[in-house]
Image (spheres, rainbow, N blue to C red):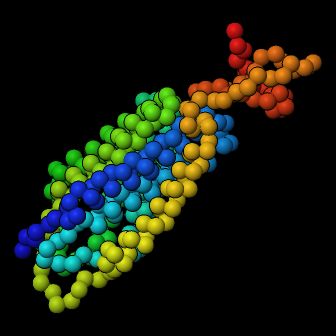
């Protein structure tokens, strides 16, 4: 029989909190992506990995915060622990691939299309894999057109957010990008939930798996702690906050140039100390 599905058991509390979690992860991840474009390649991988983990953790937390408000009147809902963990891994890995493409290739047309598509598909894959981890006395069905629309929303919004992060125009610009990334995750989630149909059947036994309170609440502590730690890294890095390199004049001494030396990173130039300037041959941009 067709079941009565309610995605807003706690009213607007779960949608709002879920959106804020997606925005938090997006803000941290996109700022790390922007920061990676201001450093040499040897340090870029660390910032991109941190950004991918932040975005992946944010959208995963968003999904299961929203699922705390999901209920089916005719049957209790439990979750499979292994599949739930796998959905987090899929989110981080696929988002990471997209972020690394944009981080190394820059916000160009091909890189943005490829990276945004993979990032959007990562968000969608996390959602539907998480849904596959639900255990209830019934069968899940989806409307194909609505599912397709949810994936398109994720891809378009993720591409837009990566483009905005790649512009490197400061903190407020990245806040706007994080709001778009939150829209990608939340819009995709609730569009996907609108495609869901549950056909329940009677059973004397409770569904397998663990209840949301027993599984999801403890599981979300880890990603939340990680997001807080990532936030500390972001807050204490001046290049991330300001969105531009910080430099100071070089003291005038014999053998030291009177103008500051900058390191060419592809998109911007960063100040290099005279000691580092002699280690490699970089182009220097002289102030005129």
For this orientation, the residue located farthest to the left is 1
Residue 77: name its quadrant: bottom left
Q: In the picture, which quadrant includes the N terminus?
A: bottom left
Residue occupying the point 77% across, 17% down: 259
Q: Is residue 216 visible?
A: yes
Image location (x, y in percent) of residue 236: 61, 44
Residue occupying the point 43% across, 70% down: 219
Image location (x, y in percent) of residue 75: 17, 78
Left or right position of 160 against 257: left
- In the rendered image, the vertical position of residue 42 relative to residue 5, given as above or below: above
Viewer-proximal residue among 93 and 214? 214
- In the rendered image, the vertical position of residue 85 relative to residue 11, given as above or below: below
Residue occupying the point 81% across, 32% down: 276
Left or right position of 152 against 227: left
Image location (x, y in percent) of residue 275: 85, 31
Image location (x, y in percent) of residue 177: 40, 37
Residue occupying the point 61% across, 26% down: 268
């Amino acid at each position: 029989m067709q079941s009565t599905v309610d995605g807003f058991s706690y009213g607007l509390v779960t949608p709002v909190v879920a959106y804020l979690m997606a925005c938090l992860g997006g803000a941290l991840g996109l700022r790390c992506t922007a920061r990676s474009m201001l450093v040499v390649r040897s340090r870029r991988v660390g910032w991109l990995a941190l950004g991918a983990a932040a975005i992946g953790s944010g959208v995963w937390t968003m999904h299961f915060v929203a699922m705390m408000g999901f209920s089916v009147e005719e049957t209790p809902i439990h979750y499979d622990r292994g599949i739930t963990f796998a959905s987090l891994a899929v989110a981080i890995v696929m988002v990471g691939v997209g972020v690394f493409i944009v981080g190394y290739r820059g916000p160009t047309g091909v890189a943005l299309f490829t990276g945004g598509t993979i990032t959007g598909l990562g968000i969608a894959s996390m959602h539907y894999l998480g849904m596959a981890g639900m255990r209830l006395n019934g069968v899940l069905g989806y409307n194909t057109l609505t599912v397709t629309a949810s994936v398109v929303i994720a891809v378009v919004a993720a591409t837009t957010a990566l483009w905005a992060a790649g512009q490197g125009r400061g903190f407020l610009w990245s806040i706007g990008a994080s709001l778009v990334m939150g829209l990608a995750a939340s819009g995709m989630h609730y569009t996907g939930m609108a495609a869901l149909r549950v056909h329940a059947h009677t059973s004397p036994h409770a569904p397998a798996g663990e209840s949301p309170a027993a599984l999801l609440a403890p599981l979300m502590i880890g990603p939340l702690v990680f997001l807080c730690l990532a936030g500390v890294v972001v807050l204490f890095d001046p290049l991330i906050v300001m969105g531009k390199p910080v430099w100071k004049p070089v003291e005038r001494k014999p053998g030291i140039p009177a103008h500051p030396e900058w390191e060419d990173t592809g998109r911007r130039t960063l100040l290099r100390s005279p000691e580092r300037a002699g280690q490699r041959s970089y182009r220097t941009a002289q102030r005129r």
